[in-house]
Image: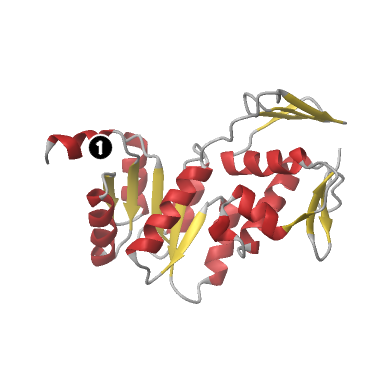
Amino acid sequence: MNDSRRVKQMNSPCVLVVDDEKILRDFVHRNLEARGYKVISASNGLEALASFYQEEIELVILDVMMPHMDGLETTRRIRETSNVPIIILTALGEETDKVRAFDLGVDDYLTKPFGVGELMGRIQAVLRRSRWQEPSSNEERFVRGNIMVEIANHNVFVSGKHIDLTPTEFNLLLYLIRNVGKALTHRAILQNVWGQEYSNESEYLRVYIGKLRQKMESDPLNPKHILTEHGIGYRFEG
């Protein structure tokens, strides 16, 4: 490896690629490495966890169907200790696995087969969302009723209790509270939180709204803060 490529790799995220199909695993590994990423490969969930606990992993690309330990169980174990971004790989028709994966906390998915352009686009979007949004110069704290958000240091409190949010959950909440009282369309929320390429991915929004309600509402089935605007989208009320 030449010096310029070595420096580029040192400054790029370390990606863990997990798939029992060697051809696909090598395809992803090769294309990421060619773009300067540091890549670690594993053929199943057990190998993946061993590497995850030994290395500074910044992104996991994970197949669902694998021997020894599948992608869903691997995701569950990773989420016990880390909010690292996770992209799952699914086959056509695996809608049930996709929904379960989102419930476990994955950030995105790719349906096989996929091309290099789609792979890199998803990786870049997930890494972008995994970073906390920076506050505006006049933003420090948001307080409404029993909710307090310390915007500068990304702390959220409900009735005095600290609530642990992932970067995507926090960025979604921040967009909602910056537009408190306004009915926001699904498309507007998706474009501002996930990016322009996610305008029609309503499933993302539904899952993450559900996650915020579970963490912030005293009764998630009858929310008082994160309200549904039927036929439109969502609205945040203090």
Residue found at the far left of this picture? 2
Query: Visible in this render: residue 150?
Result: yes
Name the residue rendered at 59%, 35% in the picture.
Answer: 133
> Is 236 placed left or right of 128 in the picture?
right
Q: Is residue 145 above or below residue 100?
A: above
Query: Residue 58, how many percent across, how many down?
Result: 40, 40
Amino acid at the residue labelled 1: Lys
Q: Split into 4 quadrants, where in the image is the N terminus? A: top left
Name the residue rendered at 54%, 59% in the picture.
Answer: 197
Residue 146, located in which quarter of the rendered image?
A: top right
Residue 156, located in which quarter of the rendered image?
A: top right
Q: Split into 4 quadrants, where in the image is the C terminus? A: top right
Query: Residue 137, how many percent across, how many down?
Result: 65, 24
> Is 23 placed left or right of 134 in the picture?
left
Which residue in the structure is indicated by mark 1? 8
Name the residue rendered at 35%, 67% in the picture.
Answer: 115
SS for dot 1: helix
Query: Residue 188, how many percent across, how many down?
Result: 69, 55
Name the residue rendered at 55%, 71% in the picture.
Answer: 95
Query: Visible in this render: residue 85?
Result: no
227 or 124, which is in the foreground?
Answer: 124
